[in-house]
């Protein structure tokens, strides 16, 4: 058992509430968490009320029930989301509830289930929860994605360990990467936030027209929209409340111009998506669209993802993550995007975040597209960075500025 586990878990709950979503007085909170994580859930509820939350709603997740639903529900039910789910999503968006998502599920939880059924249900849920998705993508409310150690996931990350030993090993990594091992985790996060803001400020001054990513398995040029905005670590609501969308985080990111993407890119880490593991993906882009996509593992899943809607075939996010980041140096593959994307430069298929272009949160979907911002109901990150990745910034006049050399800031 981890020494002082309960004390560390309490610190973690406090960090999630105070830094993750930065709960404000009178604000509702919604917590998405597995039924296996009751202790952490109760600590978060307690911290949220102490911070002044008006109410804390818990959306319990249970992989077993979800698997059974996906296996047995009628086609009609898979494609039609009940009105009460839509209303709840709209309530969360209207009340600007702080959203806390705790990831702990088995990365391969839905392996063996008919991909068409999963894709149908995901498309239906995407439409039903459009309002809350939009409020989140616009940063109209504070939101954070964090993790917790469940046995099936832990045993996948540490295959040489079983049961509690694997769970303890994963908790150790979660605590380390979220700075819980520091004397004052909240202060440590504010210092880390400052460092990443310095990088995003420099990139915002440069206003590159494009980025050129090159490694032995990638050669792609990704245009950037005019007046694009880089973000690092902390984000802000319209009221000026800072929150941390991902914990851990080591990235700075912006939106690409979804009309100007050309070349090929290869994934460097496995991707856990829709309860399946995808490996060794390669995408070829022409004029902003995927024209060819292959995966050594998960080809069918990848094809369903790309068929989600028109925007799923382009990119909505480009990020920079130095290879010397702590998660990368741990050498651990987490099979979880929250961690693996913070070990590696990554790109995302699907929607761009409207706040990544000046004035974007006030734009309609049509206006966003006119600015080169991708619109989609999906957003799936995949990892492309490595220790031999070079990235150049290309200015409007053609000047080339080194941004990354051998996987680190130039």
Image: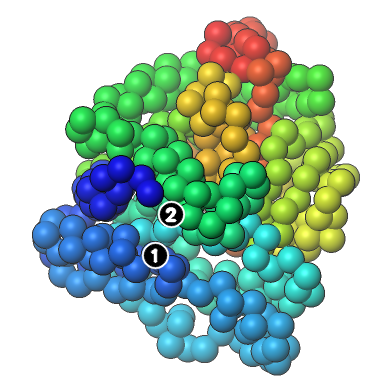
- Find disc 1 in the rendering and name its residue: 37
Q: Name the residue nearer the viewer: 98 or 162.
A: 162
* In the displayed structure image, the side of residue 404 where residue 304 appears, left or right: right
Residue, x 64% and y 83% (percent of image)?
68
| Residue in view at x 54 percent, y 28 percent | 330
User: At which x and y percent is residue 97?
Assistant: 29, 65
Q: Secondary structure at mark 2?
A: loop
Q: Secondary structure at mark 1?
A: helix
Whether pointer 1 and pointer 2 mark residues with C-beta atoms closer than 8 Å, the reply is yes
Where residue 52 appears, as percent x and y from the top left, is 11, 61
Q: Is residue 301 above or below residue 205?
A: below
Disc 2 designates what residue? 148
Image point (49%, 59%), residue name: 150
Tell me which corner region of the image, top left, top right, bottom left or bottom right, holds residue 197: top left
Q: Quadrant of residue 127?
A: bottom right
Q: Residue at x 52, y 35 (%)?
A: 342
């Amino acid at each position: 058992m981890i020494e002082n586990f309960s004390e560390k878990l309490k610190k973690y709950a406090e960090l999630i509430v105070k830094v993750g979503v930065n709960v404000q007085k009178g604000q509702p909170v919604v917590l998405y968490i597995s039924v296996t994580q009751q202790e952490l859930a109760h600590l978060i509820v307690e911290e949220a009320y102490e911070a002044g939350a008006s109410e804390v709603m818990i959306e319990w997740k249970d992989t077993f029930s979800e698997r059974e639903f996906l296996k047995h529900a009628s086609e009609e039910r898979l494609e039609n989301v009940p009105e009460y789910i839509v209303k709840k999503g709209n309530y969360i968006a209207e009340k600007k509830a702080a959203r806390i998502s705790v990831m702990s599920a088995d990365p391969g939880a839905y392996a063996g289930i008919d991909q068409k059924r999963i894709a149908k249900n995901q498309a239906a849920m995407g439409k039903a929860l459009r309002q809350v998705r939009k409020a989140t993508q616009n940063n109209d409310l504070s939101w954070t994605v964090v993790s917790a150690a469940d046995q099936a996931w832990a045993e996948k990350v540490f295959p040489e360990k079983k049961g509690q030993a694997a769970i303890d090993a994963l908790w150790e990594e979660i605590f380390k990467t979220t700075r819980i091992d520091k004397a004052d985790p909240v202060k440590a996060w504010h210092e880390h936030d400052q460092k990443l803001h310095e990088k995003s400020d420099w990139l915002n001054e440069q206003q590159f027209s494009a980025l050129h990513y090159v490694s032995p398995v990638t050669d792609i040029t990704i245009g950037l929209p005019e007046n694009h905005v880089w973000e690092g670590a902390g984000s802000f609501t319209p009221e000026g409340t800072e929150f941390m969308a991902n914990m851990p985080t080591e990235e700075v990111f912006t939106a690409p111009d979804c009309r100007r993407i050309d070349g090929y890119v290869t994934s460097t880490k496995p991707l856990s998506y829709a309860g399946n593991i995808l490996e060794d993906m390669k995408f070829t882009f022409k004029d902003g669209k995927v024209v060819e996509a292959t995966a050594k593992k998960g080809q069918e899943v990848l094809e369903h993802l790309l068929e989600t809607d028109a925007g799923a075939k382009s990119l909505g996010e480009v990020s920079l993550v130095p290879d010397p980041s702590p998660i990368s140096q741990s050498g651990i593959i987490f099979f979880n995007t929250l961690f693996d994307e913070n070990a590696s430069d990554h790109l995302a298929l699907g929607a761009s975040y409207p706040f990544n272009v000046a004035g974007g949160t006030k734009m309609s979907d049509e206006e966003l597209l006119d600015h080169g911002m991708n619109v989609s109901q999906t957003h799936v990150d995949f990892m492309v960075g490595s220790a031999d990745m070079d990235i150049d910034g290309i200015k409007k006049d053609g000047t080339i500025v080194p941004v990354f050399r051998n996987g680190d800031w130039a």
